[in-house]
Structure formats: structure tokens, C-alpha cells
Amino acid sequence: MAAKGLVYGPLGSSCVHLCVDMQRLFAPGGPWAIPWTQKVMPAIEELAARHAQRTLFTRFIPAARPGEGQGMWARYYRRWAEVTLASIDRDFVELMPTLRRLVPPAKVLDKHVYSPWTEGHLDSVLKNWEVNTLVITGGETDVCVLATVLGAIDRGFRVVLVTDALCSSSDSTHDAIMELYHSRFSEQVEATTVQGVLDGWH
């Protein structure tokens, strides 16, 4: 089982809160609305506000127009032509307002695929900040959060998943991925609540 709670000790100055894709795209009324966002937002807001200087928000940026993208991404954006930048209000890519107000001191990193690692910018930021621990929140548990977690594990980061600050549009796959984290990554992943993080990050 994945470690429950901060079993490897308290969090400190080498820790960053990495909040995945909490944007208007996925808010109620957005083109890819995730109903759970409303449920987890208070926990994310509290954590981000408490550690704004050590919070990094990722934003998923859709293709500019239908059919644009490398390989299968071109097919993806033919399927989702209505969510390309040519078709939506650009404000949909922005963070949700209660999070956007924290920038700065919080920072934003844009990405064009599920993983925040493939374009190289995140590696550079974390190296400059001398980070060894990532506290991960956001959505979706079974898509962009999954890509974020696996990349962090491969790079040797201590990974802390905040269980009450993750969301998905699918209950069944959210539950399946949480079980995957719990059952297969026992040495690399800790799972705790936002209160557990707040109590353990000084």
C-alpha cells in the first residue's frame, strides 16, 4: 500500500505545491467541465493561499486550431475542434479566479499535453528552486495528475498526493487510479489530506 500520511517526515523549504490544471476550462460552465472541481476547490485554495510562494500552477493550453498538433494530437483536436483556441474564449485557459489572484507570488507553467514534464520547463524551474518534494493537487486524477505523478516518480521526487484535493470527471477511473497509487507505488507515493499537509509543512 502507498504510505498514508507524511511517513517520511515533515515538509520543508525543498517542497513545492504543484497544482494541476485548475482552470476555467474544467470549471462548471466550461467546455470540459468537471463537476468535482467545486468540491475540491476549498481545499486547494487553502493550501495554495497558505504556501503561495511555493505554489506552481500548471495550465493545459489547447491547440490553436482544429487538426493542429503532433501525431495523434492532430486527430484529438479534430475530435475536439470546439475546444481549440480558435473556438473558445481565451479566458477559459485561465486559472479559476480564486487561484488566479494568488499569482504572483504563485507561478504558472503552461503545457500543451497531459504531462508537464515533456517540454522541459518544469524540470528547469524545480532545479532552480532546489526542490525534492512535490505536493500534488488538481485534476484530472486519471489523466493529467497521473502523467504528473509518474514523471515525478521517474525523476526521484518525493510525491505527496492530497487525496481531498484531486478531482476527475469519472468516479470509476478516479477510484481505479487511486487504488493504483495505493497498491503499486508504496515506496514513492504518500497520500494524505490537505489538513495533513498544512499540519506537516512548516
Image: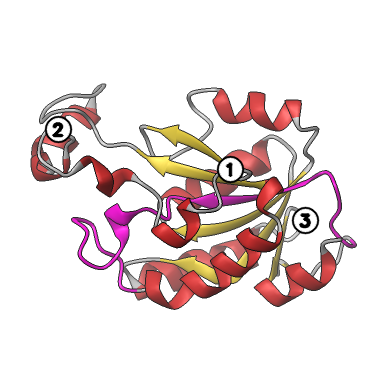
- Against 147, residue 49 (above or below) is below
42 vs 166, nearest the viewer: 42
Label located before the other in sequence (2 or 1): 2
Helix, strand or loop at disc 2? helix
Q: Residues within 10 Å of mark 3 (few under 14, many from 20)?
A: few
Q: Is residue 57 above or below residue 177?
A: above
Q: In the rendered view of the protein, which quadrant contains the N terminus?
A: bottom right
Query: Image point 86% across, 53% down: which residue?
Result: 12
Task: For marks 3 and 2, give the one nearer the viewer.
Answer: 2
Disc 3 and disc 2: Cα gap in Å?
37 Å
- The residue tagged 1 is 104
Is any atom of residue 86 visible in this view? yes
Residue that carries the numbered disc 2 in the rendered image: 75
Q: Amino acid at mark 2?
A: Arg
Disc on res. 69 = none
Q: Does 83 appear in magenta?
A: no
In the image, residue 165 lies at what x, y percent? 54, 69
**Where is mark 3, residue-wise?**
187
SS for dot 3: loop
31 or 3: which is nearer to us? 31
Tell me the amino acid under the disc marked 1.
Pro
Does the magenta stretch mainly form a helix, a strand or a loop? loop
* Residue 179 seen in this snapshot: no
User: Please, what secondary structure does the residue beneath circle 1 have?
Assistant: loop
Q: Which is closer to the viewer, label 3 or label 1?
A: 1
Specify the amino acid type for callout 3: Glu
Q: CA distance from mark 3 to mark 1?
A: 34 Å
Q: Residue at x 77, y 38 (%)?
A: 131
Q: Which residues are magenta?
A: 9-35
Quadrant (top left/top right/bottom left/bottom right) for the C terminus: bottom right
Choose the circle earlier in sequence order: 3 or 2. Answer: 2
The answer for how far apart the CA atoms under marks 2 and 1 are is 36 Å
